[in-house]
Image: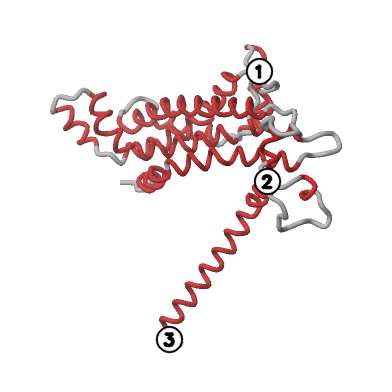
Amino acid sequence: MSSALKKRIGKAVTWALTFLLMLIICMPGLWVVLTGFRPNREVLAKPAVWIPEELSLNNFAQIFGFGAEQVAIPVPAYFTNSLIIALTSTAIAILIGMSGGYAFARFRFRFKDGIFLGLMLSRTVPGIALSLPVFMIWSRIGLIDTKPGLIIVYVALNIPFTIWLIDGFFRQIPKEMSEAAQVDGCTRWQAFWKIEFPLARSGIASAAIFAFLTSWNEYALASQLTRSTDSKTLPVGLMDFTAQFTIDWAGMSAMAVIIIVPALILTFIVQKHLISGLTFGGVKG
């Protein structure tokens, strides 16, 4: 057997194993998506129906209040809450993270390493471990079941990671570029906005997408800090499909699809910045 043939066989086996592995990884998500388009009777059928016999948008119409059979769950309100909370917390976290990352990358100040280490250590604490102390503090100051209460928590969760990620990108940009711009008459702010920000925007976009996905998908803290329709997010709203003796799997899966789609759309929009940003930030000089 020639070496060229061996390489082709090896390549084919590698691709086949990769496809099989990706199929196993994606199967639960694919099953959820298909369930969202199937009637409940088919989902609960015994023996199980592996290949869908009927696909429709009835589940989506029902959870949004259309059609003959409506689900008494305020999905539009949950979607609006999730969008407001995720976008607001992401914007605030990026503004603070960009300022902090730039400061750590460009300036020297006392206790710099200790503060940076403290921020990174705070990120290692799982969010669920903070639920009890946060709940006690928030209940005393009146932030339980409010959007600002959840936004503040998500900002605090996202800031350490965004500072760490953006700091890495700014470190890759030579200081001499900003200094040359200032010699030519730019202020420090103009040098940052015209020179350094365009070069680091891929990294900032990467940090933004991670911060958004963290806020959009988070369940543990949101389930503890929200109670009513005014503040519940989509992941928490999934539990509304469960009753004492039954679970509306079709409706729950349809709502899960609604949670997945915006994240996929946002990732697709910024994928160029995401890929280049992660590649750029991974090179240390």
* Residue type at tag 3: Ser
Q: Secondary structure at mark 1?
A: loop
Q: Which residue is mark 2?
A: 56
**Amino acid type of the residue that numbered disc 1 sits on in the rendered structure:** Ile
Task: Using the numbered discs, state the Cα–Cα distance from disc 3 to disc 2 in whole angstroms.
Answer: 52 Å
Residue 134 location, x and y as percent?
Answer: 63, 22
Q: Nearer the viewer, mark 1 or mark 2?
A: 2
Q: Nearer the viewer, residue 217 or 106?
A: 217
Query: Of the residues under marks 3 and 2, which one precedes in the sequence?
Result: 3
The answer to whether mark 3 and mark 2 are in CB contact below 8 A is no
The colour scheme of the drawn protein is secondary structure
Residue visible at 79% across and 56% down in the picture: 48
Tell me the residue that label 3 is attached to: 2
Residue 115 occupies which quadrant of the picture? top left
Q: Which mark is residue 144?
A: 1
What's the residue at 35%, 48% (across, down)?
283
Q: Amino acid at mark 2?
A: Ser
* Residue 229: x %, y % from top left: 68, 22
Query: Few, some or many C-alpha atoms within 10 Å of disc 1 (few <14, some 14-19, many ≥20)?
Result: many
Circle 3 SS class: loop
Dividing the picture into quadrants, the one containing residue 185 is top left
- For the point 54% across and 64% down, which residue is it? 18
